[in-house]
Amino acid sequence: MKGIVFLNGEPPKGEIDCTGALTVCCDGALRWAEGKARIDVKAGDFDSLGYIPADALVYPSRKNFTDGEIALEYLLTHGCTEIELYGGGGGRDDHFYGNLCLLYAAFLRGVSARMITNYTDIYCAAGETVWKNKKGITLSLAPVGESAHIIESEGLRYPLEDLTLTAHACRGLSNVVEEDFARIVCDAGTLFVFEVREEAKW
């Protein structure tokens, strides 16, 4: 089952396909999500929105978890095994970091989660990761935590062989998929994977 979370960051440029998905809208995301996507559940403390919408799941503003965590847990407990997050970029950068943590939290529970911003798809990966028919995209890799090890790669502009990516260096940034089939094997640790669809122009 697919789940979708709407977060209170930069609104997506287009409409969101919610076919067959359970959707949860977090707090201030209601401002951009209404009319752009179907909303099944409204959840959060609604301090950003400034009012409490009808039929919402309301939580106290003083709590030890974010509205994004509330939405993720709701989808996980309702059987979602594939989750997309929209509105996770832009706005407050500290919240962007928190949204990355949601991806890893889902990964640890065996669920595929992907944050889709206006420019990039972001997800966690370990073991073998394969890209098919994505020739030309920019690909960046970063360790979740202190380090992650890539034992081999194929089809990338800059080969990654027996390479440890660390949190204090930028070695995994700005690679390019150069073949219709590309792959890496992360044999230790977990990666944040950034697939850049479009570069922002300021």
Image (spheres, helix red, strand yellow):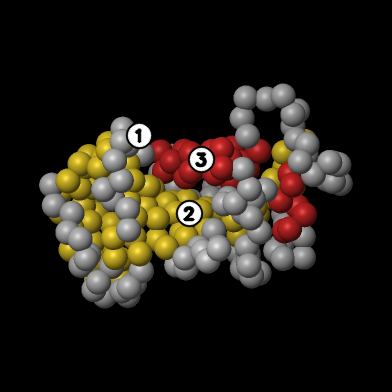
Residue at the (32%, 37%) spot, across then down: 167
Upstream in sequence: badge 3 or badge 1: 3
Q: Report the side of 181 relative to 110 (left or right).
A: left
Q: Is residue 106 visible?
A: no
The three-letter amino acid code for the residue at tag 1 is Gly
Q: Is residue 46 above or below residue 20?
A: above
Residue at image mark 2? 114
Q: Position of residue 66 (x, y in %)?
A: 63, 34
Distance, label 1 to label 2, CA atoms, is: 18 Å
Is label 3 in contact with label 1 (beta carbons under 8 Å)? no
| Spatial separation of the CA atoms under disc 3 and disc 1 | 12 Å
Q: Residues within 10 Å of mark 1 (few under 14, many from 20)?
A: few
Residue at the disc numbered 3: 97
Pointer 1: what residue? 145
Which callout, 2 or 3, points to the residue nearer the camera? 3
Residue situated in front as seen by the camera: 112 or 156: 156
Res 117 label: none
Tag 1 secondary structure: loop
**Residue 200 can be seen in this image:** yes
Please tell me whether mark 3 sits on a helix, a strand or a loop: helix
Q: Position of residue 109 (x, y in %)?
A: 43, 39
Q: Which of the two discs, 1 and 2, labels the residue nearer the N terminus? A: 2
